[in-house]
Amino acid sequence: MAGVRAGARLRAGVLPVSAVFTLGELAALLGVRAEGPPGLRLVGVAPLEAAGPDQLTFVKDVRHLALLARSQAGAVLCRAQDDVAGRPALRVENPRLAAARAVALFRPPAPVEPGRHAQCAVAPDAVVPASCQVGPFAVVERGAVLGERVVLGPHVVVGAGARLGDDTRLDARVVLYPGVSVGRRCHLHAGVVIGAPGFGYEQTRAGPVGFPQHGTVVLGDDVRIGANSTVDRATFLATRLGDGTAVDNLVQVSHNVSVGPGVLICALAGIGGGARLGRHSVVGPQGALAPEALLGDGTILGARGAIASHQRLEAPGRIFMGDTPMPLEDWKRWQIVRLRAGRARGPAGGLTTEPGPAPGG
């Protein structure tokens, strides 16, 4: 019964579910232990407060366990030690991670519909396999090479000589400039631009003089880039994003940047020219790396954090905050000191409220 289509329906504004699984099937697919009737039918994943009797939810800590008592969810993803009062459960090490995998099972990507829309434009010498889906007004320029099962949404432009790996999807209005390379199983969301010229200038008395940007961009496999983000081409060589990197919406990655595998870059972040991000590092919302800065392997730069030009921040597993980055624990103490000083100065001193939870805390 796994993968059976469910009737289209809406619940609280959520998109229609796409499949039905039993509790036993989900346990097998996720490789976990199930408690409860294996034939229990589930149609999707929902948060505690919104889940119904035919949906799966998850609890990730003690606070969520307290909320579970009021939830109508039919089954729950939880940790081995969690007391869920006899509710059908899937016991996992990381409930949130398991929930993400379950959502992917219930709502798989739309299937590829091979073929070319009558209003697309494909250059005669472009390589576009019959398994690809080319949407309306999409353009594939001369010498471009697409892998198998590539999907091009409406108004996508694939520049001359660009290359795309198998099973990659470009949503509406994505632009790949000439010569860029995108790996396998990548997903570029609406409005993404890859390979625009980097912002390289030399300032003179007569005004800025542009430095030609003739390099390229190379995206690894399984890269995800959010809506309206940009990755600029390098000056001479390549701007690179490693395998499995995920970039949020409205992010700027400048020329000559090197991003290791498994990196997370959150919304509104700006990565300056020549900056380097080590493997599995994280840049929080509105984070910034100035040109030639380095964020080391596994290091986390929190919301609005900034690293100055040529500075290095390397501390695997630690979180840093502020425009002069400091460890999260020190940053929290500093915020308390600042706010207490403000109260001592009175109304003219600015903020007088107690600090809330620190970002990333």
Image: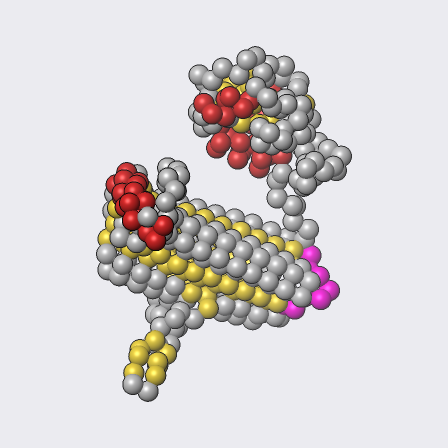
Q: Is residue 276 visible?
A: no
- Residue at the bottom extreme of this rendering: 206
**Magenta-drawn stretch contains 323:** no
In this view of the protein, which residue sits in the foreground, 358 or 12? Answer: 358
Residue at image point 42% right, 65% down: 232
Q: Looking at the image, which is closer to me, 265 or 164?
A: 265
- Where residue 140 appears, x then y in whole percent? 59, 66
The N terminus: image quadrant: top right
Instruction: Determine if the magenta segment contains residue 116.
Output: yes
What residue do we see at 68% from left, 37% from top?
A: 12
Camera-nearest residue between 233 and 287: 287
x then y, percent, for residue 97: 48, 33
Q: Is residue 164 above or below residue 208?
A: above
Residue 3 lies in what quarter of the image?
top right
Which of the 4 quarters of the picture holds residue 41? top right
Q: Is residue 311 left or right of residue 209?
A: left
State the residue at coordinates (76%, 34%). Answer: 7
Question: In the rendered image, which quarter contains the C terminus?
Answer: top left
**Residue under the image location 34 percent in, 83 percent down:** 207
Estimate the x, y position of residue 267 in percent, counting from the top left.
46, 52
Q: Is residue 6 visible?
A: yes
Give the residue furthest to the top: 86
Image position, residue 297 (x, y; %): 30, 45
Compared with residue 230, is residue 351 higher up or lower down, i.e. above or below?
above
Q: Which residues are magenta?
A: 115-122
Compared with 158, 112 (above or below) is: above
In this view, 228 is above or below 244: below
